[in-house]
Image (cartoon, rainbow, N blue to C red):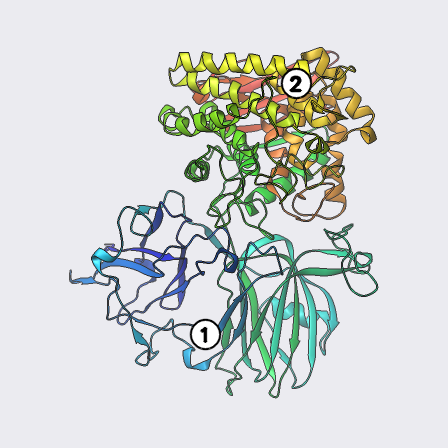
Amino acid sequence: MRLPARICISADSRYKLYINDRLAEVGPSKGDSQIWFQDEIDIRSYLKSGDNVIAVEVLRFPVNPFGGNQSAMVTSFPGLYFYGKCTDIEGNIYDISADSQWRYRVDNRVEVKAEAPGFAPLHFYENVREDLTVAGWKGTGYDDSAWEKAVPYPDRGIRKAVSPGNLNARTIPFMYRKKRTFSRVMRVVSSAYPAEKWEAFLRGGEKITAASGTEEIVEIDAGEEMTGYLKLVVSGGAGSQIEILQSEAYVQNEDLAADGAKPQSAPLKKDRLDMENGHLEGYTDVYYPAGADSEDACQTYEPFWFRTFRFIRLHITAGETPLVLHRFDYEETGYPLEIRSHAETSDASLADIWDISARTLKRCMHETYEDCPFYEQLQYVMDSRSQILYTYASAADDRLARKCMDDFRRSQRYDGMLCSAYPNTKPNVIPGFSIYYILMLHDHMMYFGDRELIRYHMPAVEKVLYCFEQHVTDKGYVSKLGDVHSKDKFWSFIDWAPQWVSGVPNAVRTGSITMESLLYLLGLTTASELAEFIGRKEQAQEYRTQAEHLKESIRRYCMGKNGMIKDGPECEEYSQHCQVFGVLTGVLDKEEGRKALLETLIHRDQYAQCTVSMALYLYRALEETDLYEYTDGCWEIWREMVRNHMTTCAESDSYPRSECHAWGALALYELPSVILGVRPAAPGYAKVKIAPVPGYLTWAKGEAVTPKGMVAVSWKKDGDQLQVEYQLPEGLEASV
């Protein structure tokens, strides 16, 4: 019989719960000033007969947003919440809630530091000086009598209406954790031991001893981009220093100037395994062992926050006593995403692109969607809309998506705009990003058909659109809303096109940018369908009427004599982006759009091109204009990633700062939804549309997951004909 042993736990800012020296859970799910989350955990499997130790490590970030992690909000009440009861085999009930009998200690061993001067959104790297007086504090036998007694907050001291008093149940699953070892040694830079000895150590079969006064430098490969909790176990080593540099890739040595300075804004990258012409760049934790005399008295270093890495550079400087390395491995962690869709095609290269795309999406999903796990770990609206769509198409899982949409709804400002990234202690606004939130809701409507969810979010949609409406000029298009980064209160980012400064079209110098009018138009037409779905026909018609007026204005003031859409009404520059969104909004009819897109595809050097972030929308426009065969050339960006031995998708082909950016996981949508052709034909997948788009391919087969079950599709070209076969789950009707 399994006896109950359930606890509720939360903390400001973060906790790690240990039961008898075993890591049980990490949390809480990220909240904000309005809502805070608690976790309910069954700890029975961690308990044993006799004495048990519950130990919690709490990381508290400062109130000053420049001194902490941007995605980890703080309240006015630092500390721990812990409530629980446990029943023993005789039926005795024990209250194990935190009270004044608990003991605490401020861990002065750890200095949390910024990863870089200036922009440092993570702010969780560490310098740790070991203290043997706290060795074994998470297990039985440790004497905590010298620690302080915990001080409970008074019942009336914390308001229940706001965080952290407004505790809510966790809405997403716990992150998975899986024990992993490193795959190999890349190179031994300086060591008394050969690579084979180091690899035996990484497998757990050998120890490495760094003699007093020696230096050991070795570079280690995890085999793929990874997010995980590092764990280093050592003994001895008084006066030693261990630097653990985490890196995504080898970057080219020519990236460095003669004086060692970095002239480029992003590292120069070619083959990510090119250690002959490259070096590792990244962020570093530093650990100073305390030098226990006995080899059995091990010291363990585990950074509090999970780390992102593909490569590790261990740099050991041994002190006055030898340092013995016993173990170095990690626990992989992330959102428990189960990718179920799969496809094969006549283009074998798409299999490798699928592989790096799947890994990219997984690495960018934890307690929120993330733009990149290595640099920011922030949930951006534009990024998340794509990631959510990829999640639906590959896994039919909407649990994290629901939290994401609710996060952004709570981020809404007084003027109606949403914060471009949230949760975020340092909010900023990218006007067009608020429209992607509306697209998120429409995607959920089509896949899951939850009318209550749309009703709940509709007031936020109305405020977004009203904000844009207030910025419509007397000529009918949207006025200038922002500028390049940090030049105005809003950042009018569109894409990382190399011709633009900080992702903003050059038209911003002369006034409005057409892309913000096009995004507003897309928001109106999408919102009209949401309103129709929840029975608000008058509102739907109002949005359609506004959309028609805006469309006419764009055609009148933003069209060039060449039949293409200009980047701004007062600017004679053109980009692929405006033609793409011209097609998607109906500003350009099919023939106009086809002609304009072909112009940008054939004369690429004359037009700012859609980079990785905008590929989803480029592919939709190519599909709409019967130009999907051109995706063969577009996939070359991803083929180059594979050829350069990337294991995840780059942030941009023009700005490859991040090696892992999930807006690039495009294959997870294209293969099941477009190439196999499985998409919702009515809200809530009431019907499924089976309409493969072959493009340049000659055959494809596979299965696409839907909320109603798996759909199997196979097709092949026979001359001008497409022979399609499919199987549906029971109760799902096809619309071919």
Q: Closest to the observer: 276 or 476?
A: 476
Give the structural element (helix, strand or loop) at label 2: helix
Residue 58 x %, y %: 40, 63
Percent of width and height locating residue 267: 74, 53
Report the side of 629 relative to 171 (left or right).
right
Q: Which residue is mark 2?
A: 583
Which of the pair 252/671 is nearer the observer? 252
Q: Is residue 546 visible?
A: yes
Q: Is residue 240 above or below residue 277?
A: below
| Residue positioned 26% across, 51% down in the render | 159
- Front one among 263 and 189: 263
Q: CA distance from mark 2 to mark 1?
A: 59 Å
Task: Answer with the quarter of the image where residue 627 lies.
Answer: top right
Residue at label 1? 108
Residue 348, x across and y down, in percent:
72, 34
Amino acid type, label 1: Asn
Q: Amino acid at mark 2?
A: Val
Q: What residue appears at the point 26 percent right and 71 percent down from the top-left corner?
A: 50
